[in-house]
Image: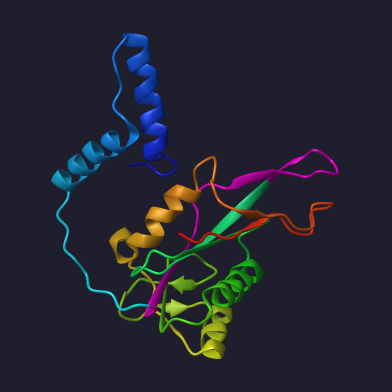
Amino acid sequence: MRNGVTRKLLWTEYVNECQLAGDEPLMYSQFCYYIQQDEEKRRATMHINRKPGERVEVDWAGDPAHFTDPATGEIVNAYVFVGVMPYSQYTYAEAFLDEKQAAWNTAHVHMFQFFGGVPKILVPDNTKTAVVHNKRWEDPQVNRSCYELAEHYGTAIIPARIRHPKDKPSAEGNVEYYGAAEPPVRWWQSHLSGLSEPPRFVVAC
């Protein structure tokens, strides 16, 4: 599915079409089942064994979320960082006002605090806040600030290969989810009187 297109959105459109045609639509769970069956037919996959807490896949959600500044009423972009443990699919997400280095590093610190530990391996996408270049997958050049963060916490950075989303499938799946319009998560509102910090939300799923 395209970035930002979720099964929930597809199902909603499908239900609307059924109602216009006078047909009885499938339940959401049934709809998802048939979508999954179709996806499995279209791609070959294999099971990859994961160890609990060994690695975390990290990325920025493709499209920004939005929140309203209560002081001005302005609609402000919020760029969502997502970190996922592949073994359990335990997820951390946090919104920032930009995708700059300080936000990337801060997100990792908060994520480690939330998980209660540091994984052996971080698997980022090829964002500039993590990787300078990745022309050769076996010898990528990691961003210096990101490298120093990893050294401080005693973890290793192994970037995903360019145009290989299956190198970090858990993060890719959650990026699509949180890049969509409405994240149904618990929100911790903070600094809502100004724009010093967007609302932070943490996900446990």
| Location of residue 195 (image quadrant) | bottom right
**Quadrant of the rendered image containing residue 26:** top left
Rendering colour mode: rainbow
Q: Residue 158 vs residue 166: left or right?
A: right
Find residue 101 and report its horizontal and vertical position in percent.
Answer: 62, 70
* Residue 138 vs residue 107, the one in the foreground: 107
> Is residue 133 part of the magenta span, yes or no?
no
Quarter occupied by the N terminus: top left
69 is within the stretch colored magenta: yes
* Residue 145 % position (x, y): 58, 80
30 up-or-down from 190: above or below:
above
At horizontal 64% and vertical 67% (from top left) the residue drawn is 103
On screen, residue 100 versus residue 125, left or right, reads right
Marks counted in the figure total: 0
Q: Residue 96, image x and y in percent? A: 65, 58
Q: Is residue 46 left or right of residue 145?
A: left
The spot of residue 109 in percent (x, y) is 60, 76
Range shown magenta: 53-76
Residue at 18% x, 65% y: name it. Answer: 47
The residue shown at (28%, 74%) is 50
Q: Which quadrant is the C terminus positioned in?
A: bottom left
